[in-house]
Image (spheres, rainbow, N blue to C red):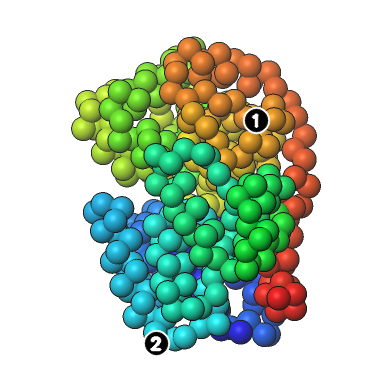
Amino acid sequence: MKIVSVVGARPQFIKAAAVSRVFLEFSEIDEKVVHTGQHFDAGMSDIFFDELGIPEPAARFDISGGTHGAMTGRMLMAMDELLSEHRPDLVLVYGDTNSTLAGALSAAKMHIPVAHVEAGLRSFNMKMPEEINRILTDNISRYLYCPTDQAVTNLTDERYDNRDCDILLTGDVMLDAMQGFSPLARKPDIDLPSKFALATVHRAENTDEPDRLAQIVSSLNNVQRETLPIVMPLHPRTRNAIASSNLDLEVTIIDPVGYLEMLWLLRSADLVLTDSGGLQKEAYFCGKPCITLRDETEWVELVEAGANFLTGAQGSEISKAAQLALELEFEPNLALFGGGNCAKRIAEHLTRGR
């Protein structure tokens, strides 16, 4: 079976690393990885290939920047050319980025089956480009690999069980990655306080709205002053947005780090503040409370478990949640996310269960 796997952004590199490792154990699978270039700088891209042993991409498109439509269109053109040349049996896509949609749409137009890893997630916020990407990708996928029971329920509610597609509860591939790579976690080469919170902000809903970004920066500064120090690997887009708005962020700012260093930071932190879907889960996997700087989350299981505090950008809510979260202790229920066997379930389904 010839498979083309499409990646382009940091979370996809991590997911692909876990899946590609398992694919190597199946002689029936011949995988080629395509890197769209959506995350292009060394700190957001190359370091993950180097650290995690992802197969060298069969093609790199170096497509980034511009509007969502322009970026997706250029990726679609490049994918059309590549798939016409290679004619794989399957195209595998991850998550909810522009790379995801371009890979899926190109394959579907050529009648090549699409497998969507992390299918069925819904925030029910159509202002998010990620929500649009994931819904459209699910609609044109033949194999829908769901990370949680809720994701399966979402697809069932949308009547996917009456379509010509396979819905499979595989568990979460990010748990596979964390379990597989945790022994390699390493401390970043920086001075860190003994107790700290780990923060990340990158979602367009936060970075592209000046008032909302200002609220979040003010809230992080308050946590820094009143609760505990914050360490923040700063996404390039967020750095530019903060500078453009002349905001003063008082936390410890570091450059983006590789996955192995992020694992170390996660395991060492006392609290996580983020708008990242992936980091919400990773915090839970590590037994760390998380404050989610969004108005909704795809990972409702974490809120229901009491491990995730959904605050939006409201300063008073963030400060209150930080105090409550630091008193919280919990044991993560990894069975909610498949126990760490997602990649193997996908490989077995593709080679034996279809």
Residue 88 percent location from the top left of the image: 51, 83
Q: Does residue 279 appear in the picture of this structure?
A: no
Q: Earlier in the sequence, mark 1 or mark 2?
A: 2
- Secondary structure found at label 2: helix
Q: Residue at x 32, y 44 (%)?
A: 236
**Residue drawn at (36%, 77%) of the image:** 80
Q: Can you tell which mark lies on residue 230?
A: none
Q: Is residue 350 above or below residue 298?
A: below
What residue is shown with label 2? 85
Residue 61 position, x and y percent, is 33, 70
Dot 1 and dot 2 residues touching (CB under 8 Å)? no
Residue 267 picture location, percent across and down: 63, 39
Q: Amino acid at mark 2?
A: Glu
344 w.r.t. 170: above or below: below
Q: Is residue 336 among what the camera can see?
A: yes
Residue topped by disc 1: 303
Q: Tell me the crowding category of disc 1: few under 14, some 14 to 19, or many 20 or more residues within 10 angstroms, Cα based.
A: some
